[in-house]
Every structure is written in C-alpha cells, then in structure tokens.
Image (cartoon, rainbow, N blue to C red):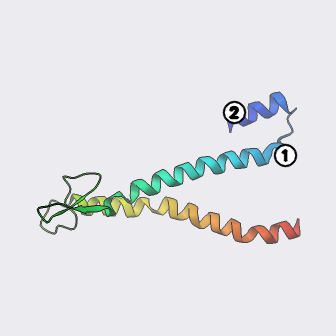
Amino acid sequence: AIVHIGFVVAKHQRRFRERAPSLIAAIGTLAMAFYISVTVTVLQPLECKLHPNGRWTTKAYENVICWDPEGDGDHVIMLVVGLFALSVPVTLFAQTITVALKLPAALRNG
C-alpha cells in the first residue's frame, strides 16, 4: 500500500480514485498467495501416509503418528491448531464468495 501511495503521488498527481483498481488487484494477489500458503500448511496434519510397519505418520513430520490414541498426543495437538487456523482461509473464502454474489447488484445500481 505504501508503494502504491508513493507511486500515485509521484506519477499520477494524487489521483487515488483512478488508481484504486490497481491497488485492489495487488491486495487480491497478496491475499491469494496468503490463502494458498495458509491452507496448505493448516491441512498438513490431515495428510498421513502408511509405512511398511503398518503405522500411519504425517507426511510433513514422519515422527508424528496419526490417529494413535496411545501416542504422545502430538497429532491431536496439530489437528486442533490446524483446524483453528483453518478459520482464517475459510473466512477469506466466505468473504470472497459474498463479494462475488453481491457484485452483479452493485454493478446494476452503480
């Protein structure tokens, strides 16, 4: 945003309203990058793989055994934190859907 403000002041004689779409597009791009990285990270505890010994471990941390009630509870902690953190990308996705649904009416009404 600071770079955008400096650019608009220097190159476009402070016509912020005309340059707002470029700022919104840049923020959208950053939000999408944030969305993808957070979603992939918080879903990692759900990605388990089977080992030859018959135990399931997480793909990212092979020392964490998945769904083991007799284990040390690391997987459960990872799941709880991951599901709580999943609220961030889910909220962003819900807001994106809300804006997309309201857009046609906003365009009609001006």
Can you give x and y, in whole percent of width and height, for residue 107 in the image? 84, 66
Q: Secondary structure at mark 1?
A: helix
Q: Is residue 109 left or right of residue 101?
A: right
Can you give x and y, in whole percent of width and height, for residue 103 in the image? 76, 67
Residue type beneath disc 2:
Val
Please report whichever mark, 1 or 2, sits nearer to the chain's N-terminal start.
2
Viewer-proximal residue among 65 and 85: 65
Residue type beneath disc 1:
Arg
**Residue indicated by mark 2:** 3
Separation of marks 1 and 2 at Cα, in angstroms: 16 Å
**Residue indicated by mark 1:** 17
Residue at the image position 58 percent from the left and 52 percent from the top: 32
Can you give x and y, in whole percent of width and height, for residue 28 in the image? 65, 51
Mark 2: few/some/many CA within 10 Å (<14, 14-19, 20+): few
Against 4, residue 93 (above or below) is below
Residue at the image position 76 percent from the left and 31 percent from the top: 7
Quarter in which the N terminus is drawn: top right
Mark 1: few/some/many CA within 10 Å (<14, 14-19, 20+): few
